[in-house]
Amino acid sequence: MKEIVVVGAGRIGATIADMLSRSGDYAVTVIDRSQEALAALDTGPEVKTARCEVAEPGALEAVLNGKFAVLSAAPYSLTIRIAEAAAAAKVHYFDLTEDVKSTRRVKEIAAKAETAFIPQCGLAPGFIAIAAMSLAKRFDTLEDVKMKVGALPQFPTNVLNYALTWSPEGVINEYCEPCEAIVDGKLSEIAPLEDIEEFTLDGVRYEAFNTSGGLGSTPQVLAGKVKNLNYRTIRYPGHARIMKLLLNDLNLKDRRDLALDIFRHALSTTRQDMVVILVEVTGTKNGKPAFERFARTILSGYVGNRERSAIQITTAAGISTVLDMLAMGQLPQKGFVQQEDIDLDTFLANRFGRAYAQDQAMTKVA
């Protein structure tokens, strides 16, 4: 049994811990700076907890000593600290961050590490890159790679048509930071909350717009191979216009602490959510124009006997699958591993990756 440390006792950390511990192959300890959060952790009794001040020099390294891997479900501000501790303790490292700057630093740390460093293992970045590369590899030449993901309430109740299903800090960050893209063959930075498009999937109308962080390392992997590459977040129509008013026109992008307070005060949380995934690729095959699409709509469900939201399930399944693939020797055991190198079919066949399978009813995982 491999010993795993999960950093962060929030909803995502709890789902990861429960998913892994229920498999019987992983002994999981969840750590957090808050004893209150640890006491409220919604997992089975087999999951251990320990208070740890991650930012304190040497504290995390002591916890990681002798462990197999550390999985970060902590705020992106702690990403670099956790990666440095993983390298010092010589354990494998995984995270869920959307933050581009942090991931660049993780890659630098990985270059000198003795273990594997696999950042951005969630939904987007994460699974979306695996799905996109699976389609892109089937083309002789690439024109457009369009990636869209959204975590949405099944039953919206406010003018934003939104509920908190994910870290509010992460949402505000992706709405404010510059977005990577490839435009007319050139690596570019484009503005968030722009390029709004509307589309229909399975009879439901959505909008999608630029947000930061979802592409992961895909722009670097496909640079020089694709004309246009972009990532957009999916919401119900009208959401982007209101967020532009709040963040841009009222300038709350420069008062993110205030924006965070507003989100937490005004928006409810929900477990009755859904995750929408859409990848569309155009190019040529055998000299002829070609188009391929990968689409999923995943509903909330259960991990064991605990009800979990769709974003909890898909995010936890993403990082758990990549960990499981590493443990089974299906991924490199040292250095930086990018999501684009992970095989989609192997991922979907994994016991945790089946959460993304087309025929998965999402009533029970692990």
Image (cartoon, rainbow, N blue to C red):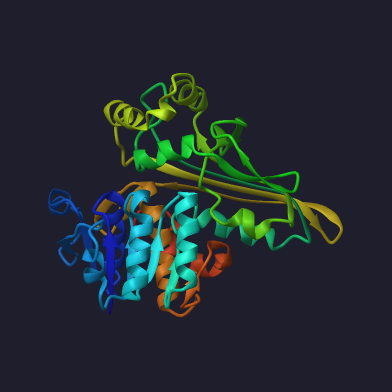
Residue 1, quarter of the rendered image: bottom left
Q: Residue at x 35, y 38 (%)?
A: 168
Q: Establish if 104 lies above or below 208.
A: below
Q: Is residue 320 left or right of residue 142?
A: left
From the top left corner, tell me how far across and down residue 186 is, in percent: 72, 47
Q: Is residue 348 left or right of residue 86?
A: right
From the top left corner, tell me how far across and down residue 302 is, in percent: 31, 53
Q: Establish if 306 lies above or below 153.
A: below
Farthest residue, direction right? 287
Residue 305, quarter of the rendered image: bottom left
Residue 82 appears anywhere in the view: yes
Q: Residue at x 69, y 63 (%)?
A: 137
Farthest residue, direction front? 57
Residue 199, quarter of the rendered image: top right
Q: Nearer the viewer, residue 14 or 87?
A: 87
Q: Nearer the viewer, residue 161 or 68?
A: 68
The number of numbered badges drawn on the structure is 0
From the top left corner, tell me how far across and down residue 88 is, in percent: 33, 72
From the top left corner, tell me how far across and down residue 281 is, in percent: 69, 50
Q: Establish if 221 lies above or below 242.
A: below
Residue 123 appears anywhere in the view: no
Which image quarter is the C terminus in? bottom left
